Image (cartoon, rainbow, N blue to C red):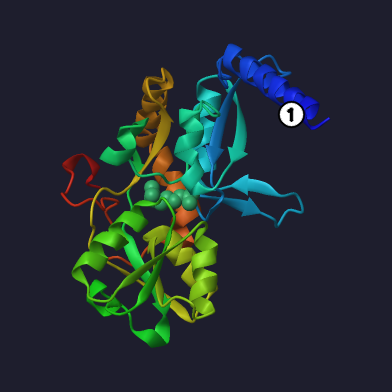
């Protein structure tokens, strides 16, 4: 009895493995055609990152909206595709591209050399800076103030890497990784962490909503800004770059930034969207 069920189990496993091995990983977008006859482009994002991507629950219908979503919709329609949006934790986005479960990621994702080993990136469409979010009363404003403090970051984000670099220089600073940015805010409020490192436009939204919290911009520890990510070798990179360049030249990106970031423009000394370590002349206003 026991032996037979074991045999059945292993046979089933073999059949399953063979089935898996014989079918190519699905190629989203390239094959799929929607009911409207348009080819479908599948994107994946992590919708807990207002104003880049988040669930708008206001209209009754739960819908992913944001700066990135408008950009994705524009690119897809310009290129003649219908857009399908899937979601995952931020940390699962690059693995999803590697497994070809999506044609692209748009998630406020920063192109880093580390990520470039596994995925390809478009040009940068928006620049950002890191900030410390903390209770107003705590006076945690600079990286030095983080000595002996527990600082939250999103798992798999550049902020996680940046916080680890800061912790090497700041005595007693501990880094705590969480899956979602709203969870970082909750943990600060619950006093389970002292502060969090979050990018400026996102920090602005959360601190506007919680007046007991403030954010302060800190110096950059590495690459910053947002780009679209693709599976390595994707033919879509060039097409996306063309539309992005067009959107930059026509001022459309600026208009969208004003739409989504207007009430949440970071109170930084420089209004220039350049937040990288070295000033990039091409991005000067
Ligand atoms: N720009 C940062 C990074 O690339 C954070 C992006 C987080 N995005 C998100 N949808 N949660 O690591």
20 lies above or below 227: above
Q: Residue furthest top?
A: 22
The residue closer to the viewer here, 82 or 102, is: 102
Q: Residue at x 41, y 59 (%)?
A: 201
Asked whether the viewer can see residue 191, the reply is yes
The residue closer to the viewer here, 17 or 68, is: 17
In the rendered structure, the answer to whether residue 59 lies left or right of residue 248 reads right
Image x and y of residue 247, in percent: 40, 33
Q: Residue at x 41, y 20 (%)?
A: 234
Q: Residue at x 58, y 16 (%)?
A: 21
**SS class of the residue under badge 1?**
helix
170 lies above or below 24: below
Q: Is mark 1 within 8 Å of ligand 1?
A: no
Q: Residue furthest bottom?
A: 137
Q: Residue furthest right?
A: 1
137 lies above or below 31: below
The residue closer to the viewer here, 73 or 195, is: 195
Image x and y of residue 159, in percent: 35, 57
Asked whether the viewer can see residue 269, the reply is no
Q: Where does the N terminus fall, quadrant-wise?
A: top right
Mark 1: few/some/many CA within 10 Å (<14, 14-19, 20+) = few
In the rendered structure, the answer to whether residue 237 lies left or right of residue 93 reads left
How many marks can you see?
1
Image x and y of residue 228, in percent: 41, 35
The residue closer to the viewer here, 92 or 189, is: 92
Image x and y of residue 162, in percent: 29, 58
Q: Residue at x 57, y 28 (%)?
A: 42
- Per the image, the residue denoted by label 1 is 6
Q: Which quadrant of the figure has residue 198?
A: bottom left
């Amino acid at each position: 009895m026991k032996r037979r069920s074991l045999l059945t189990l292993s046979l089933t496993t073999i059949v399953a493995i063979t089935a898996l091995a014989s079918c190519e990983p699905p190629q989203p977008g390239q094959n799929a055609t929607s009911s409207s006859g348009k080819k479908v482009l599948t994107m994946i994002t992590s919708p807990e990152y207002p104003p880049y991507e988040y669930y708008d629950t206001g209209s009754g219908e739960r819908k992913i909206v944001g700066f990135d979503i408008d950009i994705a919709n524009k690119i897809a329609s310009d290129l003649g595709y219908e857009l399908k949006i899937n979601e995952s934790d931020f940390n699962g986005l690059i693995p999803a591209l590697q497994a070809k479960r999506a044609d692209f990621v748009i998630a406020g994702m920063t192109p880093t050399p580390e990520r470039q080993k596994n995925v390809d990136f478009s040009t940068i469409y928006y620049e950002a800076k890191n900030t410390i979010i903390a209770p107003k009363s705590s006076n945690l404003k600079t990286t030095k103030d983080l000595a002996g403090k527990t600082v939250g970051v999103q798992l798999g984000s550049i902020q996680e890497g940046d916080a680890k670099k800061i912790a090497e220089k700041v005595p007693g600073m501990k880094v705590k990784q969480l899956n979602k940015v709203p969870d970082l805010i909750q943990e600060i409020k619950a006093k389970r962490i002292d502060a969090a490192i979050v990018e400026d436009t996102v920090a602005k939204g959360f601190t506007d909503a919680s007046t007991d919290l403030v954010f302060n911009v800190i110096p950059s520890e590495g690459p910053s800004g947002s780009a679209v990510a693709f599976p390595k070798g994707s033919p879509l990179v060039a097409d996306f770059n063309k539309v992005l360049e067009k959107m930059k030249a026509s001022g459309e990106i600026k208009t969208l930034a004003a739409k989504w970031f207007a009430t949440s423009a970071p109170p930084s000394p420089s209004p220039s969207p350049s937040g990288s370590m070295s000033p990039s002349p091409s991005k000067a206003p």
